[in-house]
Amino acid sequence: MQKNEVIHKIQLETGIAKKDVALVVESFLLTVKNTIMQGEDIYIRGFGSFEKKKIPPKIARNFKDNTAIVLASRYVPSFKPSKLFIKKMQDVS
């Protein structure tokens, strides 16, 4: 499901104008991005947490030149579903 489909589905379920739903969804996503980039985690009870995760440095291989490359440590965004969310997913399967 793409973002525009999410916006459309929320609009149908709530009856709120599509442009207002789009504004709220965009604002939510921007808030999540900015908060994680600042190093703060976001926890939504019953859904999960968004966090900034540090990936340690590692050695990779360039197969074309057959050389080793050292990849520096870096940060990536991460989502961890809550236990309740995981349980509900298992109940559906």
Image (spheres, rainbow, N blue to C red):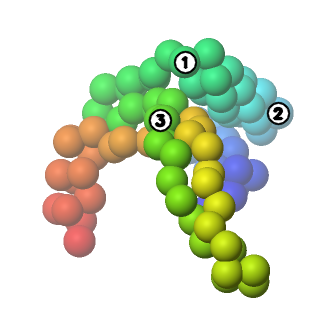
Vertical relation: 24 (above or below) 75: above
For residue 39, the mark is 1
Instruction: Kindly identify the residue that appears in the image at 75 percent across and 83 percent down.
Output: 64
Instruction: Kindly identify the residue that appears in the image at 70 percent across and 50 percent down.
Output: 3
For residue 19, the mark is 2
For residue 27, the mark is none
Percent x, y of residue 92: 24, 65
Residue 74, picture quadrant: top right
Query: Is disc 1 placed on a helix, strand or loop?
Result: loop
* Amino acid tagged 3: Lys
C-alpha span from label 3 to label 1: 9 Å
Residue 7, picture quadrant: top right
Q: Is residue 30 left or right of residue 75?
A: right
User: Marks 2 and 3: which is nearer the front?
Assistant: 3
Q: Are marks 2 and 3 in contact (CB under 8 Å)?
A: no
Closer to the chain start, of discs 2 and 3, is 2
Q: Is residue 90 visible?
A: yes
Percent x, y of residue 34: 67, 21
For residue 53, the mark is 3
Q: Nearer the viewer, residue 32 or 63?
A: 63
Closer to the chain start, of discs 1 and 2, is 2
Query: Is disc 3 placed on a helix, strand or loop?
Result: strand
Q: Nearer the viewer, residue 68 or 29?
A: 68
Query: Is disc 2 placed on a helix, strand or loop?
Result: helix
* Amino acid tagged 2: Lys
Vertical relation: 70 (above or below) 40: below
Q: Quadrant of the N terminus?
A: bottom right
Instruction: Kindly identify the residue that appears in the image at 37 percent across and 42 percent down.
Output: 80
